Image (cartoon, rainbow, N blue to C red):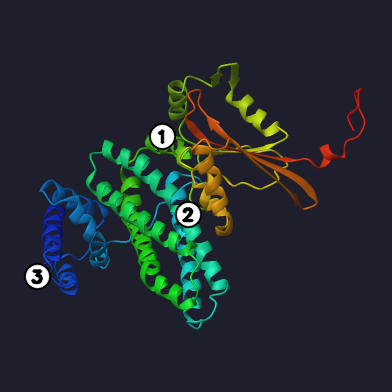
Amino acid sequence: MSEIINNSEQKIATLKSIIKRLHAGEDQEQVKASLRQLVRETDHTEIVAMEQQLIAEGMPVQELTSMCDLHSQAMREVLVQLAPPPLPAGHPAETFRRENQALSEAIARARRAMDDLEAVADEADPGEALTRWRQAVNDLMDIDKHYQRKEHVIFSMLERHGINGPSKVMWAKDDQIRDVLKQLAASLREQHATAGEWKHLAGSVGEIALRLIEEMIYKEENILIPMCLNRFTADQWGEIFLASPRYGWCLVEPRTGYQPPDSVVKQAVRLGGGDAVSLPTGNLTLQQLTALFSTLPVDITFVDADDRVAFFSEGPDRTFARSKAIIGRKVQHCHPPKSVHIVDQIIDDFRSKRQSVAEFWINFQGKFIHIRYFAVRSEQGEYLGTLEVTQDLTHVRSLEGERRLLQYA
């Protein structure tokens, strides 16, 4: 079979047979040589169809998952690199790509720090190279929000199109990446004595984590996103856009520009019961509620029962700046490593009902700042999360005497 296979069905069958040889243990270079000889080029549709057929024929998802990195490495030479279509700023696919770029930059920072650490003598103090590595890994932990949006919003939309094989494989790989990153982050919180021990971690778990993330970025950019752009309608992208904020953004915020179709927005409003939010003590429109939180003389941040940042108020003079990219992020990853143990203790004390309030006060940029944490519980006492309230008390502490007459200055 030396002729070039152009028919799509034949190409899928050939891809499938060659991938089976890879699973049977054949040398990867021999498999790649067969691909180059028998398949001049392929695209994401044929790769997806090949995986779907393998699963339908009984190949366990776990086996496909364990080999999918080898699949992508073997097929890179024959995969057609399609130019991405122009997308408006803030389109869900454009945001996914910008997140992948930010993740790639974090990987590069981690590798630079690991390389610098390698240059330190084994018995020496690792110095600032370790600090930079910790920060880069801390940034990479934000990947969970990227994966959650992919798994719960993108994959569910693919299932409407009858595509579920690749999503099962990708989801399993996502979980593997999460596990390795958690292992790496936990190890980086330990206090090793020498640079030599950190080097060992970098050469093992550290490099494995970076390679796994890079492989997933490749799959998303060259298979998943092109496949979605080829299949999803404008209304479906609008649904994805409206469903995404609950999971948050990874390292970057969506740019402004994209607007979901009006029909999708109106449908979302109908399903949500209109613009009003009904509370036990009254009703507020979303506009009123947003303005109310922005007017409060305190900064509010709410962390849910899963330790994820769920909400923060946006006043004109926030004491500590907040980015929408933190929404959905584990609160432990929003703090420097040296203070994470305090965060964990507060949440653990609140969750176990040992405590309900924790407060601190600091001098910050010439201001007296009061910071309080409150356990938020249901009427039945169930832990719902932690509320942080931050207030600049500089002016309040300066007040003396009384003011009983109206005065605006």
Return the x and y of residue 20 as percentages of the image width and height: 12, 61
Q: Taking 161 as reference, is 177 left or right?
A: right
Q: Amino acid at mark 2?
A: Arg
Residue depicted at x 38% and y 63%: 209
Mark 2 and mark 3: Cα distance apart in space: 41 Å
Can see residue 325? no
Of marks 2 and 3, the one in the foreground:
2
Q: Amino acid at mark 1?
A: Glu
Q: Are circles 1 and 3 on residues that touch, CB within 8 Å?
A: no
The residue where tag 3 is placed is: 2
Classify residue 149 by image quadrant: top left
Return the x and y of residue 202 as percentages of the image width and height: 42, 71
The secondary element bearing badge 2 is classed as helix
Can see residue 293? yes
How many marks can you see? 3
The secondary element bearing badge 1 is classed as helix
Residue depicted at x 91% and y 23%: 404
The secondary element bearing badge 3 is classed as loop
The residue where tag 2 is placed is: 98
Residue depicted at x 57% and y 37%: 355
Q: Amino acid at mark 3?
A: Ser
Give the mark nearer the N terminus: 1 vs 2: 2
Q: Taking 68 as reference, is 323 left or right?
A: right
Q: Are circles 1 and 2 on residues that touch, CB within 8 Å?
A: no
The residue where tag 1 is placed is: 239
Q: Nearer the viewer, residue 322 or 189?
A: 189
Above or below, comparing residue 262 to residue 131 in the picture: above
Above or below, comparing residue 35 to residue 283 in the picture: below
Tag of residue 39: none
Above or below, comparing residue 9 to residue 357 in the picture: below
